[in-house]
Amino acid sequence: MGKYNEFMQGRYGFDKLGGALIIVSVIVSVVGRLLWLRWTGLICIVLDLIFLYRFLSRKEYARSRENRIFIEFFENVKEFFSRDRKNYNYYTCPVCKTKFRVPKNRTQGYTAKRVCPKCKNEW
Ligand SMILES: [Zn+2]
C-alpha cells in the first residue's frame, strides 16, 4: 500500500467524470458483446485510456475543471428530462443565465414578457 500511495502522490485520481468513463466503457463493452459489434472494443480502449490519463494526471486544476464541466452538463441533462412541459414554460435569463419556469396559464395571453426572478431583467 505504501508503494501505491507513493505512486499516487500528486496525481489526480478518481472523480465523478472518471467513474462515468468507466461505467460508459463497461456498458459499451457489454452492449458490444451482446450485439456482436467489433468496433465497440476500440471505444472501450479509448475511454479507458482517457480515464487512465486523467487518473494519473498531475494537473489537478485542469482535471477538476473537466469534472466540474461534466457535472454541470450531467445536471442539465437530468433537469432537461425531468421538465414538466405540460404545465410550465422553461426559460433561461439572457443576462444572468438563471433558469426558471413559468406556469403556462400565466404566459398565455397578451403579456408575453418574461421577468427573471433573480435580476428582474425583462425581455
Ligand atoms: Zn436574470
Image: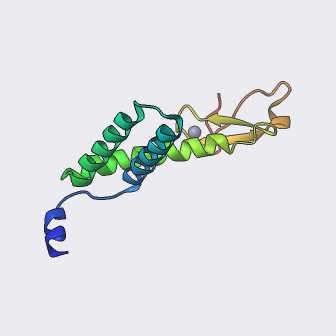
Q: Position of residue 59 (x, y in %)?
A: 20, 50
Residue 121: which quarter of the image? top right
Instruction: Give the residue furthest to the bottom.
Output: 2
Residue 16: which quarter of the image? bottom left
Q: How many marks?
A: 0
Q: Position of residue 55 (x, y in %)?
A: 26, 53
Q: Is residue 52 above or below residue 104?
A: below
Q: Is residue 2 above or below residue 54?
A: below
Q: Position of residue 60 (x, y in %)?
A: 24, 53
Residue 123: which quarter of the image? top right
**Colour theme:** rainbow
Ligand 1: quadrant of the figure: top right
60 and 21: which is toward the camera: 21
120 and 59: which is toward the camera: 59
Q: Quadrant of the N terminus?
A: bottom left
Residue at x-position 60% and y-position 35%? 92
33 and 46: which is toward the camera: 33
80 and 103: which is toward the camera: 80
Instruction: Give the residue furthest to the top.
Output: 110
Horizontal side, residue 101 vs residue 71: left or right: right
Residue at x-position 51% and y-position 45%? 74
Horizontal side, residue 98 vs residue 16: left or right: right
Horizontal side, residue 59 vs residue 72: left or right: left
Q: Position of residue 77 (x, y in %)?
A: 57, 41
Residue at x-position 30% and y-position 43%? 50
